[in-house]
Each structure stands twice: as structure tokens, then as C-alpha cells.
Image (cartoon, rainbow, N blue to C red):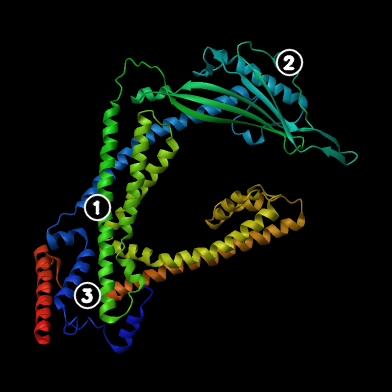
Amino acid sequence: MEESSDLYDVHEANGPPLWADHDHQCLEEPDNVECLRRKIKYYFMNPCEKYHARGRKPWKLILQIIKIAIITIQLVSFGLSNQMVVTFKEENLMTFKHLFLKDYVDGLMDTYAVYRQAEVYDHIDYILEQYGHLHNITVGNHEYEKNGTFYNPLLVCQEFYRNGTIYPGNETFEIDAHVQTDCFKVYPTYHPTLQEALPRFELHFKRMLFVKITFVLKAINLQTVRHRELPDCYDFTVTITFDNQAHSGRIKVDLETDVDINECRDWKVTGASARNIYLTVLFDCFIIVTCITSFALCTRSVINGIQLQFEYTLYCKNLFGNQVPWSDKLEFLNGWYILIIVSDTLSIIGSILKIEIQTKVLTSYDVCSIFLGTGTMFVWIGVIRYMGYFRKYNILILTLRAAFPNVIRFICCAGIIYLSYCFCGWIVLGPYHEKFRTLNTVSECLFSLVNGDDMYPTFKYMKQKSRLVWLFSRVYLYSFVSLFIYMILSLFITIITDTYDTIKQQQQSGIPTSELHKFMSVCKDLPNSGMYRLEEKKDCFLNCCITRCRKHQERLTSDA
């Protein structure tokens, strides 16, 4: 423990702690103190020691091993299904770009733009033509959305300033900042051109902000049939945007999709045996029951630790009149149990969402994957707790726990310097370097530099349009790399190594490092000594009660 109480300082100055001398400890109720020592020592034993102490089987350990296995199987199963969903979404997005964007080439979406008025009309006309001939050109199972027996129309919407006159030559303009939106409907059955479908359609280029073309296409993900899963029906809301907000003469074109996954209304699968969905749901229910059991056992252990901490605090306060330091109080709060409780909660929620997805009630694949993935991560991290029972692994875990407060303080200080560089780089280098255009990209770029990645391109791609800014960028980048790699990271490593050396020395010396450890060290009973049996515990408290009754009777006799 890093912090020591006033009681600890007194003991160091005046000799050993008051309870170190067995003859001096709690003269009134020595048996009660021994019971408290054994209770605390038993609480901090590992599952094997508890089994030797009381013969109690390590149910939590067995349950955690089972839970790791079944939750990992559940995650892999869901991950394979989720992968098919993600693949289907991404491939359809790529398909729509090739179908509806004229002369589209893979990987050039960032530079896909038009520069002439005629090109804008040609691209819109191309989209309408491709949309009208969708049945004849697509190789997928895409279909128009219907409302009853009629197809839903495609929408062409133009957003522009309501009124405005702009004369750059005279450096004068008059603009109405209110944005007006005009929309037109185009039905897919007639396969019209732009002039035929929208004879009055005209783009106001000098006032135009956006042109958005929106339509809905439906598809069925048939690849799940091979995995004995019922296919889902997808609604793709496709939005093609012509972005002219900058009015720079370059209109950027982008295509995005919003996906809704629904249960198909009617289906029939032949030639393949469908997976029994009830077995999968039953397996998920078994996981939920397992997590609830683990949650209850760990919650009970946490409550027992808190109650034991109250007993120990009350004992120190009544006997010595001193407060127990927070470092000793937190020893009773097992962080691993808290982690397991959090993981159980996430796994329960994720399993419920998975059942809802399998029964086609919900389609929240992303939300479910977050809960299941995070819960599984915490479950596997919890395995480290049991590795800590081995001496060589335990020193690593103790180092991480002891260094954590100092690491957090160090990160807070280093984070302030990091943010200062982020803001400076964004405002100064943003107009001249693509990696510094936004605060998000600046943070990613600097974090890569700290890890030694992407250094040469960051220096190379700095535009030299401004000699002053170019020189500033050199000072900025060299100072950042030197400060964080050669100083801050070295200090960070030093904090960890110093803590490791301290913990190692404490383990080698075997000297208790806190008042709580000194209190427990007086108890020399081994786990297999039989002193921790429940019968002994009951006899101990019975003796305490008998002792109290005898003393009470003696006082009454003396008063009489």
C-alpha cells in the first residue's frame, strides 16, 4: 500500500502494532479477535486454500471456467452470422455505387466529383436511367419497394438559398439565408429520361447547396441458407448526394445506404434441413442462467467483503480509536468480482438481444455485438485473477494494481500536453496537411507518431505553399516526437519498473506492508489446520457469548 495511516506511523515510531503482541491483544475478548482474524484470512484465501480450510468446493471457479467456454462458443456463433450480415451490407453498397454512379472506380470515392453543369445533369440522368432499368442490369435479387400494388417513387430533391444575386466580378452579393427544398417524384415503370420525367427541373447552381436522390431497394440475403439459417429481408434506403456547400466549382458526389433488416413475410426452404432454432435459443437461455448464478455468487462475495470490512473498521475504532486507511478498506472490495458482475450483466443483455434477433423480433446486430463482445472480453480478463494465485504471475498483477494510480495521474498530465499539440496542429497545419484537417485526424496522426508509425509520410506530405508554416511544422513535429518518445514514454516505463521492483522487494522480504496485513499475519493457522471449520467458528462465537454472559453476571453480583 502506498498510503499509511496515522496508526501505522505511531507503530513505526513506538514499536510494533498493538495487536502484534498476543498477550496484549483485546484483553477482554481474545477469542473474538481470533475469530475476526481467521474470518479475514479466510476471505483472502484462494479457492484451493478455502477448500482445504473448510472443504468448500470452488463453485465460482468451476462456474467461471464453464462460463468462459459457453460464452466463447456463443460469441463465435454470433460472430459468423454477424459477419454474413456485414458482408452483405458492404457488397450491396459497392454494387449500388457501380450501378448508379457514372464511371465509378473502386477506391476513388474521396475524389469522385463533377465540375461542369452538363456533367451534373448527365449524372442525374444516368441515375434515373439505371434505376428504371434495374431489373435488366443487376445481377442481384434487387427489387423496387412497393406500397400495396404500386411502386414507391424515387425522390429528386434540390436544396438552395431562397433568393440571391451574386456578382464576384463586382465583389457584391445579396443572399437570403433561408433554405428552400424542391422535390420531384419519378416512378420506375416508365424508364424515363430526366427531360421526360422532370421537364421543369432546373438546377440553381449559384444558390444550390445539395441535390439528393433517394430511393428504396429490397433484397434477400440468401447466403445464410448454406449455414442452415433463415434468410433475412433487407430494405436499402439509397441516398446519392451532390454536395455544393462550398460553391468552389467542385461538386462532390457521394452514395450512402441506410439498412433495415426485417423478417421475410413468407418463405419455403427445400433441399436443406433448417437448424432447430429452439436449440440455439435454449443454449442462450442456459448462458443467461449461468451468468445470473455467477452474478449472484459474486454479489454475495462482494457483500460479505463489505460486511467484513465494517467489522474490521469497527474493531480498530473501538480498540484504538483510529480510522482505517482507505487503502486497507479497498482491500475488502474485490475488483475481480466487480469485473465479473459487469461481464455477467453485459452477457445477459447481449444474450437476450441475440434471442430477439434469432426469433426475428429485433435486428440490432451492432448493439448485440457490442454487449456480447465486451462481456466476453471482461470474462477472459477475469481469468487473470486465477493466474494471480501463482507467485510469478501474481507479481505482474500486483504491479499493475499498484502502478494504476500513478499511471492515471501521469496520463492526465501527459494528456494535457497531448491536447495542446492537437489544438495547435489543427489550427496551424490543418489547411496545409490532410492529416490535420479535423481534431479527430490530428489525434490519430499524433498517436501514430507516438507509436513510431507513419512518420515519414507525415513529414513528407506537408505542403510548402507557405514557407513560414512549413518551418513551423518542422519545429512542431520534431518537438512532439522528441518530447513524447524520448521523455514521456520513458517516464511512463520508469513508473512501471519502479513499482515492479518495489513489489518484488516486498515479496522477497515477506514483511507485511499494511496494517491489515500485519493484523492477519498474527494468525499462523494453516488452511488444513482445521481451525477454519464452520464448527470451530460456531464454538468460537459460542465461547464469546458465554464469556460475555459470565462477565455480565459478575458485574451484577458485584453491584449487589
Label 2, on which residue?
Answer: 195
Upstream in the sequence, badge 1 or badge 3?
A: 1
Categorize mark 2 by other alpha carbons within 10 Å: few (<14), some (14-19), many (20+).
Answer: few
Q: CA distance from mark 1 to mark 2?
A: 72 Å
Residue 554 vertical position relative to residue 299 in the rendered view, above or below = below
Q: Nearer the viewer, mark 1 or mark 2?
A: 1
**Where, by quadrant of the figure, is residue 367 drawn?**
top left
Q: CA distance from mark 1 to mark 3?
A: 28 Å
Q: Position of residue 56 (x, y in %)?
A: 14, 57
**Where, by quadrant of the figure, is residue 422 drawn?**
bottom right
Residue 292 vertical position relative to residue 155 in the rendered view, above or below = below
Upstream in the sequence, badge 2 or badge 3?
A: 2
* Residue at the image point whose x is 39% and y is 70% from the top: 499
Judged left or right of residue 506, residue 131 is right
Upstream in the sequence, badge 1 or badge 2?
A: 2
Label 1, on which residue?
Answer: 297
Where disc 3 sits, the SS reads helix
Amino acid under disc 3: Ser
Mark number, residue 449: none
* Residue at the image point whose x is 11% and y is 80% from the top: 551
In the image, 195 versus 312, the foreground residue is 312
Amino acid under disc 2: Gln
Label 3, on which residue?
Answer: 521
Judged left or right of residue 363, residue 464 is right
Q: CA distance from mark 2 to mark 3?
A: 92 Å
